[in-house]
Image (cartoon, rainbow, N blue to C red):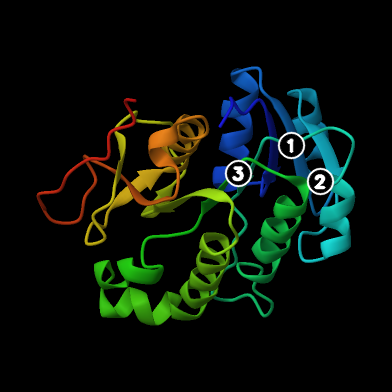
Amino acid sequence: MTSASSIFLAGASRGVGREIAKCLTAQKLKVKALLRSESTAAELTASGVDVVVGDAMNVSDVEKAMLTDEPIDAVISTIGGLPTDTERPDYPANKNLIDVAVKAGVQKFILVTSIGTGNSVAALSPQVLAALQLVLLEKDKAEQHLITSGLIYTIIRPGGLKSEPATNNGVLTEDTRIIGSIHRADVAHLVCRCLNNTRTNNKILSAVDKNMLFGKPEFTEFSLDE
C-alpha cells in the first residue's frame, strides 16, 4: 500500500473522531469529514478539514461524499451509538461506509469499535456486558462486515474512554482479555499511527492506557515499529 494522504473521516463531530481530525490536520494530511449536522462544521473547516454534511445512515449521502473525482486513500470511522439510542448507527452506518469504500477503491479502512466487541467480550464484567450488549452486537456486525469486505482493515477497540489530555501511554495489544481506560486523545494518536503502518493491516487491536489497566495483567504490547 502506498502512503495514505487523503483521508475520509466519519464521526468527526465529537469524541475520538474529533481528536483524530486534530491529529490528521496537524500532520498536514488532506481530510474530508462527513458530518450529520453543521453544528461543528465551522470549527473543523477552520482547522483545514473539508466538511461534507450528510448522514452515514443514508447510503446516497455517503456515495455523494466519497465517490468523487478526488481519490480517497483511507477511511476512518468512529461512528457508534449509545445503549439509550432507539436507532443504533454502529452497523448500518458503518456498513454503508464500508460498501462505498469498496466502490471507491479505498486502500485501508480503520474502524474504531470497543473492547467487549466480538472475541473480546470476556474482558467485560457481567454488569458492563449487560448494559452494553445490544450496542456491542451491532459493533460486532460492523467488524464482521469489514473483515469480509476485501478491504485492508485495522479494527481498534478502545477501553473506557476519558476526555482528559493525552497521556502518551496508550498502547495496542492483540490480547483480547485486556480491559482498562484510555483518553480519547491517546486513541486518536494510535489510530493515526496505524494509518500508514503495514503491521496493523488486517489486525484487530485493543487500545488501553498501560497505566490505567483494570487489574495487573501480563500482556504483550503490539509494536508499531516496522
Q: Earlier in the sequence, mark 3 or mark 2?
A: 3
**Image quarter in which the C terminus is found:** top left
Query: Which element carries disc 2, helix, strand or loop?
Result: helix
Give the quadrant of residue 45: top right
How much space separates mark 2 and mark 1, taking CA atoms? 7 Å
User: Please, is residue 150 above or below residue 167 in the view?
Assistant: below
Residue occupying image coordinates x 39% and y 70%: 118
Closer to the eye: label 3 or 1:
1
Residue type indicated by callout 1: Ile
- In this view of the protein, which residue sits in the foreground, 27 or 45? 27
User: Please, is residue 98 above or below residue 164 in the view?
Assistant: below
How much space separates mark 3 and mark 1, taking CA atoms? 18 Å
Kindly tell me whether residue 38 is visible in this rendering: no
Q: Position of residue 207 (x, y in %)?
A: 35, 47
Q: Position of residue 14 (x, y in %)?
A: 63, 46
Q: Label 3: how many residues lie within 10 Å, few (<14), some (14-19) or many (20+)? A: many
User: Please, is residue 143 above or below residue 199 in the view?
Assistant: below
Residues under numbered marks 2 and 1 in contact, where contact means CB atoms less than 8 Å apart: yes
Residue occupying image coordinates x 88% and y 61%: 60
- In this view of the protein, which residue sits in the foreground, 13 or 201? 201
Please give the residue where the numbered disc 3 appears in the rendered image.
17
Please give the residue where the numbered disc 2 appears in the rendered image.
66
Q: Earlier in the sequence, mark 3 or mark 1?
A: 3
How much space separates mark 3 and mark 2, taking CA atoms? 18 Å
Q: Is residue 64 left or right of residue 166?
A: right
Residue type indicated by callout 2: Met
Residue type indicated by callout 3: Gly
Query: Which element carries disc 3, helix, strand or loop?
Result: helix
Kindly tell me whether residue 53 is visible in this rendering: yes
Residue occupying image coordinates x 20% and y 56%: 214
Please give the residue where the numbered disc 1 appears in the rendered image.
72
